[in-house]
Image (cartoon, grey):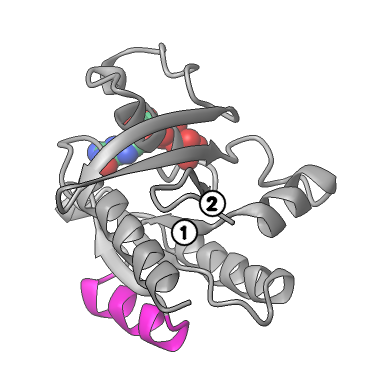
Amino acid sequence: GRAPGGPYRVVLLGASGVGKTAFSSIFAGAADSMDSDDCELCADEVCEKKIEVDGEAATITLLDTSDAETDDGPAREHYMQTGDAYLLLYSVTDRASFLRASELRITLRRFRPAQHTPIILVGNKCDLARRREVSVNEGRACAAVFDCKFIETSAAVQHNIWEAFHGMVRQLRLRRDSK
Ligand code: GDP
């Protein structure tokens, strides 16, 4: 009974500091958010926006789990159970966040065992080449093991952010059309 163009609930997951707030700020339209503390708009809140992907409108409801990630309680469970799709972020400059993404992927599988929920593994901060701790190939290999898509992004220079959202919508449509 879901309407063809959404709204799709897309959940941002990932360790602290990987760029979830920066992602949701770009999504919400605050282009200069990297230079200000004015990122509160979407943090831990629902932010709904209509975007056009391949000539067709889609409404995305973005949920940023920034403060919920250390919380293994009901809020976290709620996110894990109610998303239509997940952006699983790590920072390519932080190996611990890459390991955290793997843990979150496993937790997701536990919460959504039978369902084919679209997940994209997102390696953010690819602009910081000299501080890189996780290679592109490692990211890609991890995504292959976890059976999800993979993209590297930079919220700082706004590289591939919309591609990630568009890829998400395309996966959701494929899933919808195959039903
Ligand atoms: P969150 O804890 O996951 O919400 O992470 P934030 O969005 O608050 O980002 C943490 C820090 O990393 C902030 O200082 C951001 O400005 C910075 N940051 C986020 N994304 C990028 C990126 O793609 N490149 C660079 N260089 N810095 C980033």
For the residue pair 173 and 1, the one nearer the viewer reads as: 1
Work out which quarter of the rendered image holds the N terminus and state it: bottom right
Residue 160 spot, x, y in % from top left? 18, 50
Three-letter residue code for mark 1: Leu
Q: Which residues are magenta?
A: 135-147
Dots 2, 1 in contact, CB < 8 A: yes
Residue 61: say if magenta. no
**Residue 92 in sight here:** no
**Residue 47 in sight here:** yes
Question: Mark 2 and mark 1: span between their CA atoms?
Answer: 5 Å
Residue 66 spot, x, y in % from top left? 58, 37
Q: To which quarter of the image does residue 138 belong?
A: bottom left
Q: Is mark 1 within 8 Å of ligand 1?
A: no
Tag of residue 13: 2
Q: Is residue 164 left or right of residue 144?
A: left
**Residue drawn 20% across and 52% down?**
163
